């Protein structure tokens, strides 16, 4: 009786639909409990074969064993076939890894709005797409709740291109004269900052990063993303794009 329900849960988790972190966690937890409760008296092995671009690989595995095989794709078309030579069901998953295309170049606003400004240390606008090495500047992000009710557990993700550096300095210590809103939690990494907070109806919060154009070159800046972690269709995206850091500052 549990197996049909487990298949339904797995199908829901793998389809292209929205899930909160809580629903994902409980779905995986249910699967773990089912695996632990499975009888272990079935010692029959499973023989599978993988044919990839006319090369064949065979493997005999235990029913509970997870077998993985790395396959190097070639430009153009590729051919993959998986054969199960036993009576025990085998579930195959194809995972593709690579550099993602630059698809996050459009703005999205659903229940939240994002306004992003780049200013120098005198709070004057700067062109962040073309900076000189050594330039210090600020990224000012304003998030507004445009919905009809309060939104809790919002996550703001700001990733920076490889040519920029985050200066982990408090605004009041830097003395730039701009006020930043409080977060429930802030997680500062080498190349990104996560803020977690809530917004009342119509409320706006401001978050500031102190940055430095450090390394000469051309880079891709990922989109700035904000979402309610437990509410579907409540998110906003500010487009990413190409940025350039040029010559030495005179």
Image (cartoon, helix red, strand yellow):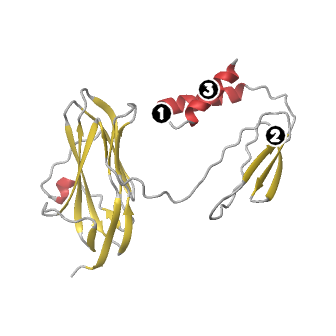
Q: Is residue 19 left or right of residue 142?
A: right
Q: From this view, report whether residue 239 is shown above or below residue 2.
A: below
Tag shown at residue 166:
none
Which mark is first along the chain, 3 or 2? 3
Q: Quadrant of residue 164?
A: bottom left
- Tell which of 167 and 236 is nearer to you: 236
Q: Residue at x 61, y 31 (%)?
A: 10
Residue 115 seen in the figure: yes
Which mark is first along the chain, 2 or 1? 1
Q: From this view, report whether residue 242 is shown above or below residue 80.
A: below
Q: Residues within 10 Å of mark 3 (few under 14, many from 20)?
A: few
Mark 2 vs mark 3: give the one in front: 3
Q: Which residue is mark 3?
A: 8
Q: How far is mark 2 from mark 3, CA to CA?
A: 24 Å
Q: Position of residue 160 (x, y in %)?
A: 35, 59
Q: Describe the element under mark 3 as helix, strand or loop.
A: helix
Q: How far is mark 3 from mark 1, CA to CA?
A: 15 Å
- Tell which of 92 and 203 is nearer to you: 92
Q: Position of residue 120 (x, y in %)?
A: 18, 64
Q: Describe the element under mark 2 as helix, strand or loop.
A: loop
Q: Residues within 10 Å of mark 2 (few under 14, many from 20)?
A: few
Q: Is residue 145 left or right of residue 49?
A: left
Q: Which residue is mark 2?
A: 62
Q: How far is mark 1 from mark 2, CA to CA?
A: 32 Å
- Tell which of 189 and 110 is nearer to you: 110
Q: From this view, report whether residue 103 is shown above or below residue 152.
A: below
Which mark is first along the chain, 1 or 3? 3
| Image label count | 3
Q: Which residue is mark 1?
A: 19
Q: Residues within 10 Å of mark 1 (few under 14, many from 20)?
A: some
Q: Position of residue 76 (x, y in %)?
A: 63, 62
């Amino acid at each position: 009786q549990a197996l049909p329900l487990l298949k339904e849960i797995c199908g829901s988790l793998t389809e292209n639909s929205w899930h909160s972190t809580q629903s994902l966690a409980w779905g995986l937890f249910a699967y773990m409990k089912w695996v632990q409760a499975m009888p272990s008296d079935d010692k029959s092995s499973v023989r599978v074969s993988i044919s990839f671009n006319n090369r064949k690989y065979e493997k005999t595995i235990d029913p509970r064993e997870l077998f993985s095989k790395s396959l190097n794709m070639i430009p153009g078309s590729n051919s993959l076939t998986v054969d199960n030579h036993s009576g025990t069901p085998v579930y195959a998953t194809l995972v593709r890894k690579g550099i993602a295309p630059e698809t996050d170049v459009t703005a999205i606003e659903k229940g939240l709005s994002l306004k992003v400004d780049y200013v120098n240390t005198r709070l004057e606008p700067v062109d962040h797409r073309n900076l000189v090495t050594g330039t210090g500047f600020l990224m000012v992000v304003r998030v507004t709740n445009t919905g009809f009710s309060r939104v809790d557990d919002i996550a703001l993700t700001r990733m920076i291109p490889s040519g920029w550096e985050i200066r982990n300095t408090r605004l009041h210590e830097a003395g730039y004269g701009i006020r930043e809103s409080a977060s429930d939690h802030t997680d500062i990494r080498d190349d990104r900052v996560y803020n977690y907070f809530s917004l009342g109806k119509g409320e706006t919060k401001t978050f500031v990063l102190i940055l430095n154009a450090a390394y000469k070159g051309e880079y891709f800046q990922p989109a700035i993303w904000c979402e309610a972690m437990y509410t579907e269709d409540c998110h906003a995206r500010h487009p990413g794009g190409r940025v350039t850091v040029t010559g030495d500052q005179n």
